[in-house]
Image (tube, rainbow, N blue to C red):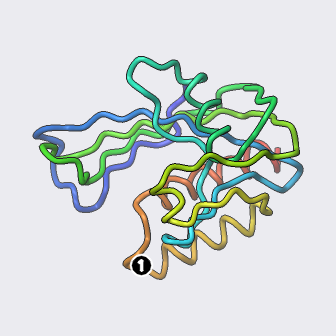
């Protein structure tokens, strides 16, 4: 899968120590200029549905599981690989100095009717909601959030905005 970007968080000066490895699979679901994203009230940002894949789980299986849990999506079909984003960032996991996160993005289709999401407790408390939104609106919102440097801003908003821009250029404006 092609590398979309390698990112190293600004607070990281060297990649050493105990590193927590995490793989995630994320869905790109388009309907014209609209894209299915997750809005998170806590961070006031838009992100891709999907998430962490278990160590022994295939990426595509984990993607379908996460997509169904977060959005209630049904009839999920993975059309093609889009790319991966490789990042190093600080972590809250005890015993680790850094997190190495590799996010794999896939273009998917789903049944337009979403079922009831099965969100985890932290996702509920963070106020996560699936939403169809115009891609330009999501990009502009996330860019304003990044520029504001809001202390509540999550670490993923920059990654998500980079990929949203690539999707706009490569899949919508092609």
Nearer-the-camera pick, 2 or 98: 98
Q: Quadrant of residue 100?
A: top left
Residue at numbered disc 1: 149
Q: Is residue 19 above or below residue 1?
A: below
Question: Viewed as shown, does residue 18 lie left or right of 27?
Answer: left
Residue 115: horizontal and vertical position, in percent? Answer: 78, 45
Position in image of residue 148 (x %, y %): 47, 82
x then y, percent, for residue 133: 78, 62
- The x, y position of residue 139, in whole percent, is 66, 65
Residue drawn at 61 percent across, 62 percent down: 46
Where is the C terminus found, in terms of image quarters? top right
**How many numbered markers are drawn?**
1
What residue lies at 28% left-to-right and 44% top-to-bottom? 99
Quarter of image, res 78: top right
Q: Which quarter of the figure is the N terminus placed in? A: top right
Q: What is the crowding at mark 1: few (fewer than 14 residues within 10 Å), some, or many (at least 20)? A: few
Is residue 163 toward the left or the right of residue 93 in the image? right
Give the camera-side residue of 51 and 144. Answer: 51
Q: Is residue 49 left or right of residue 133?
A: left
Q: Is residue 127 above or below residue 54?
A: below
Give the vertical position of 13 relative to 18 (above or below).
below
């Amino acid at each position: 899968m092609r590398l979309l970007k390698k990112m190293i968080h600004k607070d990281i000066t060297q990649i050493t120590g105990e590193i927590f490895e995490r793989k995630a699979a994320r869905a790109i679901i388009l309907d014209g200029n609209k894209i299915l994203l997750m809005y998170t009230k806590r961070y006031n940002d838009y992100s891709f549905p999907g998430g962490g894949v278990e160590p022994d789980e295939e990426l595509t299986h984990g993607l379908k599981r996460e997509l169904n849990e977060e959005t209630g999506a049904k009839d999920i079909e993975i059309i093609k690989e889009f790319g991966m984003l490789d990042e190093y960032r600080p972590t809250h996991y005890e015993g680790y100095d850094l997190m190495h996160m590799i996010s794999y993005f896939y273009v998917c289709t789903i049944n337009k009717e979403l079922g009831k999401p099965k969100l985890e407790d932290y996702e509920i408390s963070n106020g996560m909601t699936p939403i169809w939104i115009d891609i330009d609106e999501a990009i502009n919102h996330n860019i304003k959030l990044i520029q504001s440097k809001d202390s509540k801003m999550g670490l993923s908003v920059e990654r998500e905005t980079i990929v949203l821009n690539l999707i706009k250029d490569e899949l919508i404006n092609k």
